[in-house]
Amino acid sequence: MYCPECRAEYREGIETCPDCEIRLVVELPAEDPDEDLVAVFETADVSLLPIVKSLLDSARIPCVVQGEEALSVLPVGRWGSGISQSGRGLAATFWVDKERVEEAEELLRPLAEGESPAEPEEA
Ligand SMILES: [Zn+2]
């Protein structure tokens, strides 16, 4: 049992934190600073990276890309479209704030389905 306030651990049977006087929880919520980010798109196709970025950009959805560096050092011709996405080390993952997940997924759905996306409209 853990106190969600001071994060102290207590043994089973204790129900409230004597310091904070609040109920203990079975598991502490993750303290990962990335907990607000959700992966919305994963690809091993380097040619998709700028497209995904510009789509998110045009919708003003901030994103974090993971694995991009690993991809960019690979020869594009060999690792271009058609590569299996099962090679974990080759995939780039786009993370967005969980508040914007649905928006981003909607935006990226055509890409995820392998179709070309509609051109983002110029403002
Ligand atoms: Zn406490």
Image (cartoon, rainbow, N blue to C red):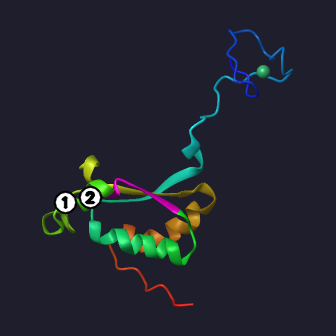
Q: Label 1 near label 2: C-beta < 8 Å?
A: yes
Q: Mark 1 packing: few (<14 Cα in 10 Å), some, or many (20+)?
A: few
Please tell me which residue is depicted at 20% across the width and 61% down the height of the picture. Answer: 83
Stretch in magenta = 63-68
| Residue 33 position within the rendered picture, expressed as x and y whole percent measured from the top left | 58, 43
In the picture shown, does residue 27 fall above or below 57? above
Three-letter code for the amino acid on which mark 1 is drawn: Leu
Asked whether residue 65 is drawn in magenta, I would say yes
Three-letter code for the amino acid on which mark 2 is drawn: Leu
Please tell me which residue is depicted at 43% across the width and 70% down the height of the picture. Answer: 53
In the picture of the structure, the residue carrying the numbered disc 1 is: 74
Figure quadrant of the C terminus: bottom right
* Image mark count: 2
Q: Looking at the picture, tell me which residue is in the foreground, 57 or 105.
A: 57
Asked whether residue 24 is drawn in magenta, I would say no
Which SS does the magenta portion mostly show? strand
